[in-house]
Image (cartoon, rainbow, N blue to C red):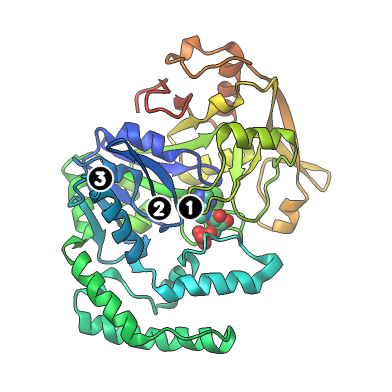
Amino acid sequence: MPSYVVVGSQWGDEGKGKIVDVLGEKADMVVRFQGGNNAGHTVVVNGKKTVLHLLPSGALHPNAKCIIGPGVVIDPFVFLQEIDALESQGFDSSHILISDCAHLIMPYHIKLDMLQEERLANNKIGTTKRGIGPCYADKYTRIGLRVGDLIDFETFKKRLASTLAIKNEQITKLYREEPFDYDKLVEQFKEIREKLYDRIIDSVTVVNEALDSNQHVLFEGAQAAMLDINYGTYPYVTSSSPTSAGVCEGAGVSPHKLDKIIGVVKAYSTRVGEGPFITELNDENGAKLRKIGNEYGATTGRPRRCGWLDLCVVKRAAVINGLTDLVITKIDVLDSFEKIPVCIAYEINGKRTTAIPSSLEEYAKAKPIYEMMDGWCEDITSIRCYDDLPENCKKFLAKIEEFTKTKISLVSVGPDRENNIVIHEI
Ligand code: IMP
């Protein structure tokens, strides 16, 4: 069946780019359906490393059309920078297209993201400060500007004038900062319009036609289930739905058309930004995971918080997304640990549960209940076949399958493209 959804099953940074790389080989189309330039993945183009934040990693498969879908919020300055970076390395970007319904992240959204975080002080979300939240807020307040508004520039100018009046009032009266200049924004966006014009499409029609003609379509998620606006650890979440349901909403595709829903799971846990993280390790094991796993944010450079694998989190992702397959990444980072605790339940107010409470106050009380697994204490990066994995590593994988009731189809045992073990063909 030809449509694949790839989503994060923890707090993001699970290494989704790796599986997209594998699946991208056969994709005719790659679609991003939510989020914005808060994501981050390092890609190698013509031998040179480039970090992409907005463009999906699947954009690098030049034979696949790449669509920035309606549910995405797009910073046009970042979009053009990323296109320039790729083109300067000899990459043809004419296959990268943008939905007319995607919302524009405006310079005032970035300013407001910063001001709001500062104002929240100790209660800050720890956002990437890229204007994501304020842009989605305007979308739902129905004062946002969409990529399609650029087509008729007079309409764009009118909508900008009306929205900017509200935004400037917030900026000057609430935060006592300088307002944004309307004429300057108009000039900037006139230029942006010219550069984006040929890429603006009705993506809903284009994506559905591709699906209906049996093309391989890959929906590439950013962030992950625990950062979902509805089901994550609210308010310490992002502002979109990085789930399979998010594909339907953010790409305009029926759930009937989603065939494989692949959840990417890192063999341990990491989180950037604030919010509860029950298996977090503030000790030498956490530091060791960070060092071996090189756990620093690709977007912000922040050191990621590290901890043991939390299967309650992964199970929730499996349920919410209806995962058909799991991909386990960075399992080689655990190679030198003699004991590997895996969280299989929480104790909250003296009661055992695997559910994640919606109240953060309740969740903060959770104590992890671990199953202690034996490590394998050998380098597995050169292994390419499941049967050759050490027994303890197989037991670790079996525990994940048993707990989540989802089969593991691929295991990544190292950073390189070929460091993969295929268990089931996806
Ligand atoms: P925002 O998406 O910039 O509003 O940030 C909200 C929360 O989501 C913060 O905790 C961010 O660190 C987190 N976040 C956003 N994008 C990513 C990502 O790609 N990986 C990991 N965390 C992310």
Identity of the residue drawn at 19% across and 57% down: 205
Mark earlier in primary sequence (3, 1): 3
Instruction: Classify the position of the C terminus by image quarter.
Output: top left
* Marking on residue 89: 3
Spot occupied by residue 340 in the image (x, y as percentages of width and height): 68, 25
Numbered disc 1: secondary structure: loop
- Callout 2 amino acid: His
Specify the amino acid type for callout 3: Gln
Classify 414 as above or below 382.
below
> Pointer 3 and pointer 1: residues touching (CB < 8 Å)?
no
Residue 53 in picture, x, y percent from top left: 40, 53
Residue 299 bears which disc, if any?
Answer: 1
Front in this rendered view, residue 49 or 154? 49
Does 156 sit left or right of 179 as displayed?
A: left
Residue 417's quadrant in the figure? Answer: top left
Gap between marks 3 and 1 measured at Cα: 21 Å
Residue sticking out furthest to the right: 350
Q: Quadrant of the N terminus?
A: top left
Query: Residue, x 41% and y 42% (percent of image)?
Result: 42
Query: From this viewpoint, which residue is outermost toward the top?
Result: 388
The tag on residue 53 is 2
Q: Are marks 1 and 2 in contact (CB under 8 Å)?
A: yes
